[in-house]
Image (cartoon, helix red, strand yellow):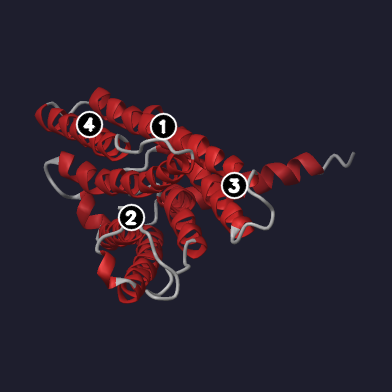
Amino acid sequence: MDPSLPKVAAVVVSSASNWWDEVNNSALWQDWIFHILAFLYGLVAAVALIQLIRIECRVPEYGWTTQKVFHFLNFLVNGVRSAVFTFRRSVQRIRPEVLQHVLLDLPSLAFFTTYALLVLFWAEIYYQARAVSTDRLRPTFYASNSVIYSIQIALWLLFWWKPIQPVLVLSKLFFAGVSFFAALGFLLYGGRLFLMLQRFPVESRGRRKKLQEVGYVATICFSCFSVRCIMMCFNAFDKAADLDVLNHPILNFLYYLLVEIIPSSLVLFILRKLPPRRGITQYHPIH
């Protein structure tokens, strides 16, 4: 073994570490990275809005279907994220500090609700196909979201009243738990629907395409919520993994790219198919 290799490796690691620190501590790099994130979120928001308009033009008579609500929430979440990252430096100066956490964390909760809609949609399809009543699914969905938002609001109020680190840690661990159950939902109902579609006859119309759609979306969403859960746990206890500060722009970029931007883009692309026009095939939305 060449004795110079360890020295070369040490120099490379040292250079990479210096570059990481230089970028993190540079106000110019911070602004560039946050503005890139704002642009990417704005792009995803625009795609979701365009798709929503196309669906509305195609089937305006059906009102707010699950598909329309899903695209609207995608537009809302990504639009708010884009605005927050556009003014990220100003957000960091907002007082009281709890308002910073509301602006940074509320879109994450809305992201959870947006993709929990897919789990609800799949659960309804699965139980309807098995001739099981779906009457309790939507009330359960609404009640679960109400409880989650209520707990998070209570944690924000607690932090406003007593801004101490343990409350922040509790808030991040709570969101890690929410992400864990979201990942579990995609694994459970995505897996069930995938296995049910596999048992359909091979010649079933659209079976293969729907099978791929469910498989891809379930895998993407399970992965992104799992990564978010793990990252939130690190974020709660390790200051080097803190996402709520300006001097971790690279970490912010990688985190939001992996858990929101790329998953949202892929899911919107996979679910890009418009419902059939009225009169060609009867469209039965799940409300």
Marked residue nearer the N-terminal end (1 or 4): 4
Amino acid carrying mark 1 in the image: Phe
Task: Give yes or no for contact between labels 3 and 1 (Cβ–Cβ under 8 Å).
Answer: no
Q: Which residue is mark 2?
A: 66
Marked residue nearer the N-terminal end (2 or 1): 2
Question: Marks 3 and 1: which is nearer the front?
Answer: 3
Query: Badge 2: few (under 14), some or many (20 or more) residues near its Cα, within 10 Å?
Result: some
Q: Which mark is residue 147?
A: 4
**Disc 2 element:** helix
Task: Give the CA distance from mark 3 to mark 4.
Answer: 33 Å
Task: Give the CA distance from mark 3 to mark 2.
Answer: 21 Å
Q: Which residue is mark 3?
A: 197
Say which quarter of the image contains residue 127: top left
Residue in the image at 39% along x and 27% along y: 237
Tell me: residue 189, above or below residue 117: above
Marked residue nearer the N-terminal end (3 or 4): 4
Residue in the image at 23% along x and 42% along y: 101
